[in-house]
Image (cartoon, rainbow, N blue to C red):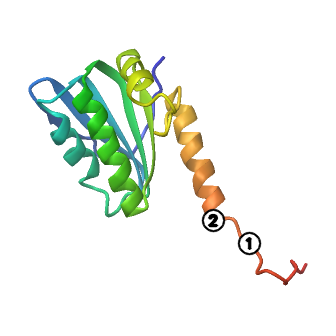
Amino acid sequence: MSTAITTSRPIDRTQSSTATFTTRWLEPSVAVITAQGDLDASNAQEFVDYALRGAQRTHRLALDLTGVDFFGTAGFSALHTLNVRCAGAGVEWVLVPSNAVSRLMRICDPDSTLPIAATMPAGLARLCAEQRRLLQLVSEPGQGFRQ
């Protein structure tokens, strides 16, 4: 199932020898990176560089990997690198895998430590829920909430 997401911003596209990477900005700080084709040792670092090149203005990042036909172990290493770099930059992220990505994730990430959603709408909802949780007001200890 494909989800149509409209944006008034232009779509940025990069093509490697075996994959195409596309960025759609849903909001000024929310990006959806789509990868199609094969993610392997020949382009895993290019994928990381592409996904993180707007990190200074990105607060939430969704990776749409539903169009990935082959996902090698270098692709998993790329996701681990993204996880570490996003954590360091304070970027919340989620990935939506294809069957090929899911297969390798079951082997390389059996405890599901990476943020995965079954669909793009579910992934975007997860990112929005995380943003709301971070913005929730908390009263100081010993001081009640006044109305």
Q: Which residue lies under the disc numbered 1?
A: 138
Furthest-bottom residue in this view: 143
Measure how far apart labels 2 and 1 are at the Cα level: 9 Å
Q: Is residue 147 above or below residue 102?
A: below
In this rendering, position of residue 32 left or right of residue 131: left
> Dot 2 lies on which element?
helix
* Quadrant (top left, top right, bottom left, bottom right) of the C terminus: bottom right
Q: Is residue 45 above or below residue 41?
A: below
Point out residue 61 in the picture as x, y percentages from the top left corner. 41, 47
In this view of the protein, which residue sits in the foreground, 114 or 117?
Answer: 114
Residue 78: name its quadrant.
Answer: top left
Point out residue 106 in the picture as x, y percentages from the top left corner. 44, 22
Q: Amino acid at mark 2?
A: Leu
Discs 2/1, front:
1
Q: Which residue lies under the disc numbered 2?
A: 135
In this view of the protein, which residue sits in the foreground, 3 or 33?
Answer: 33
